[in-house]
Image: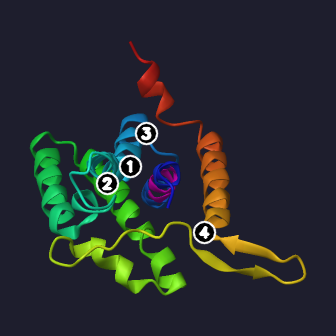
Amino acid sequence: MQPIVHLVVGYICYREFVRYRDGGPPNDVPVLVAVFAAGLADFIDKPLAAADIAPVGRTVGHSLVFVVPLLLLVWVLAIRRERRDLGVAFAIGYLSHIATDVPWHVLSGDFHELGFLFWPLTPMPPYTGVKPLGTIPGLKAEVTTLWLEAVILVAGVALWWVDGRPGLGALRRD
């Protein structure tokens, strides 16, 4: 999944949690935490791969071997600071990233690429990129994961706009 789409999915997941729990749109600061956390795996791994420190762009930040202890640490800090809402936002955002990196591999049958989930205990081959999902009969157009990601991106931005663009208020404060 493209990094920007992970941010949108993190927002959508956190938004839906808050709407279910509270019945209204999410607050500014937890939204920023959820969106930040949704991108964190890529913020960690992509630079490591670009600098040839890690073999591929899905290693440490995408591995449950790292993610689970990180989530526990963040949860403990959130409890100590009496900001459980931020701990929940972080967990939802981060886990949305990991969860949405899985389906494309499953749908395309590239199960071996799921090695990132338990790296370094399991090997992580190079990511093969955009996955074909099928063709549109009669148009000879190939549907790829990018099509679905574009729909998710547009839908997420629309939901964010309808919700009053939460997160911007915290960024505008002096």
Using the rendered view, name the quadrant where residue 174 is placed.
top left
Q: Which residue is the site of mark 3?
A: 27
Identify the residue under disc 4: 145
Q: Is residue 171 left or right of residue 75?
A: right
User: In the image as oriented, which residue stretches furthest toward the top?
Assistant: 174
Q: Secondary structure at mark 3?
A: loop
Q: Secondary structure at mark 2?
A: helix
Q: Amino acid at mark 3?
A: Asn
For the residues labelled 1 and 2, say whether their Cβ atoms are less than 8 Å apart.
yes
Which sits in the foreground, 79 or 60?
Answer: 60
For the point 49% across and 87% down, which residue is it? 109
Q: CA distance from mark 4 to mark 1?
A: 19 Å
Give how far across and how far down residue 151 sits, in percent. 67, 60
| Label 1 crowd (10 A; few <14 / some 14-19 / many >=20) | many
| Residue hosting label 2 | 41
Q: Circle 1 sits in a helix, a strand or a loop, which is it?
A: helix
Q: Is residue 24 shown in magenta?
A: no
The type of residue carrying mark 2 is Ala
The residue pinned by badge 1 equals 39
Q: Quadrant of residue 101?
A: bottom left
What's under tag 1, amino acid-wise?
A: Gly
Mark 4 or mark 3: name the one nearer the start of the chain: 3
Q: CA distance from mark 1 to mark 2?
A: 6 Å
What is the magenta range?
Answer: 8-13
* Viewer-side residue, 84 vs 147: 147
